[in-house]
Amino acid sequence: MSHYALSRVRRRPPERMQGGNLSLAGQLTYAPRGSGKRALNLDSARVSLRTKGVIAFVIVMLYVVAIGITLAQQRATLRATVEQQRNLYQAEEALGRVNSALAYAILNVNEAYATPNSRATAETIALDIGAVQAGLQGLSERYPLMQPWIVRLDHNSAMIRAEWGNKRLVELRENLHQLVTQLDDVTSEARNRQQALTENFRHIYDSITLTSVVMGLAGALLFGGVVMRFFSLLVRDIRKLRARATEVVTGYRGMPIEITRHDELGALMESVNNMQSELRERERQLEIARQQRFHQEKMAAIGSLAATIAHEVNNPIAAITGVAEAIQDQRISNMCSGERCRPELILEQTRRISQITRQLAEMTTPYSPEPQLLDLNALLRRTCGFIRYDKRFGNIEFNLDLDSEVPAINAVADHLTQVLMNLLINAADASCDIVGREPSVSVVTRSSGAEVVLVVADNGCGMDAPTMARAFDEAFTTKAPGHGSGIGLFMCKSLIEAEGGRIELDSTPGRGTRASVYLPRPATRE
């Protein structure tokens, strides 16, 4: 059985189609379907290549800024470390000066204590203590523990001036030695702190260097990888699009190209898919128009031939009829015996010939190309009576069950004639090879709510589920090569949908197929 794909058919001239137009020279000018709000939504959903470039530039700049901020923070820490080291250097210098003054004071105190006639006096010792106090005063801000020593040395200086002697010198020397021990601890602490700051400086410096190198290389590798990936995909999609465009030009009408992008190239892919869809629809419409023209030309040729045959046959039929009527008159007047004169047989056959020529004339009468109110039952009788003369229906039993209550429908008569003829021919082809039962075809009409139902059923070979699933697919046929093009059911469904109706198939393998056509009833006027 022949089947063809279903596609939504819009009633329009074959030279024009929505979304673009195809000239007779084969040139296509495509305009994407949809406009207004839908088009704006599609455009807003896309990200242009320029926008992607701007986004990439912004990301790179943000990455550079992030590196700069990280390095700036580390440099700030490094500057703080250097500042701390500078302060420690200054403290160590102050400690050195205090230690020198303290050593000179201890030397003078020891000399005064050991040598009675020493040149050291209370005033010189007080001056030495004052020098030590001045150094301690400079350290007291950083080392508050030096402040008590300034008070103690001030007391020792006052006692030396008030009571010069070995007792006061011993006291002063013990205090100075304790101060030396305290200063040694402070100096050791400062050196340890200086060493820690030096290590921290090296660590921060190495961290800055490592961060600069690692983040620089990571950024270069990441950005380079993204750029290579982007352009690789871009080149791949361009090549795929170019190949598909070439295939479409050379006749490819398969699955559309997969759209994986949302930029200008994605929009171009969508345009190519729409162009392919429009070309496919255009070719379908052209095939429908070609089949319709072929049907009209065939029926016109049959009509012309039928008119010629009817003209040639009617003359001898008229003569035969006249002779038969004369014989009948003689029989009535008992001039011819009933056994030899049987004019009713001649009259019956001449009426049969006249009926055949009348059927041919009615069937081939041109119909209006516009929808009009039709008597569906009368059209079915004429079509079935005409197609009986096809040799494929020689052994097939015809069953007509036409509901007399079926209302007139508004449709194009030529379209319904084509649909019925295709369904009947398919039924005959499906019934030609059955074994064990007489082939039969039933044509039924009935009313069903707001629809008029036309059913064409056969008891032929039927169709299995996979064949049913593809029954209306484009160019699909189970007939042998040269016996079917796959346009039959596609034509039926296209024409029925053009009339605002629908067609359904129900088939059982080995038992037959049932094609149901649902046509809308015309609206009643109140």
Image (cartoon, grey):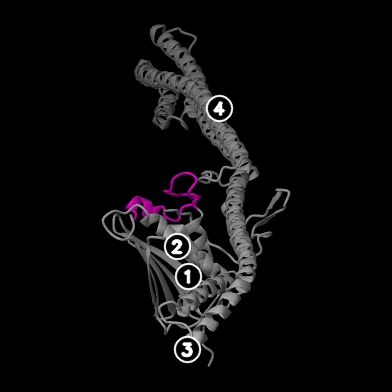
Judging depth in this view, the residue of 419 and 182 nearest the camera is 419
Report the amino acid beneath label 4: Ala
Tag 2 and tag 1, C-beta contact below 8 Å: no
The residue where tag 2 is placed is 423
Report the amino acid beneath label 3: Ile
Is 145 situated above or below 128? below
Mark 4 residue element? helix
The residue where tag 4 is placed is 220
Spot occupied by residue 404 in the image (x, y as percentages of width and height) = 42, 83
Range of magenta residues: 462-486
The residue where tag 1 is placed is 385
User: Disc 3 vs disc 2: which is toward the camera?
Assistant: 3
Q: Earlier in the sequence, mark 3 or mark 4?
A: 4
**Image disc number at residue 332:** 3
Spot occupied by residue 423 in the image (x, y as percentages of width and height) = 45, 62
Report the amino acid beneath label 1: Gly
464 magenta-colored: yes
How crowded is the residue under tag 4: few (<14 C-alpha within 10 Å), some, or many (20+)? few
User: Disc 4 vs disc 1: which is toward the camera?
Assistant: 1
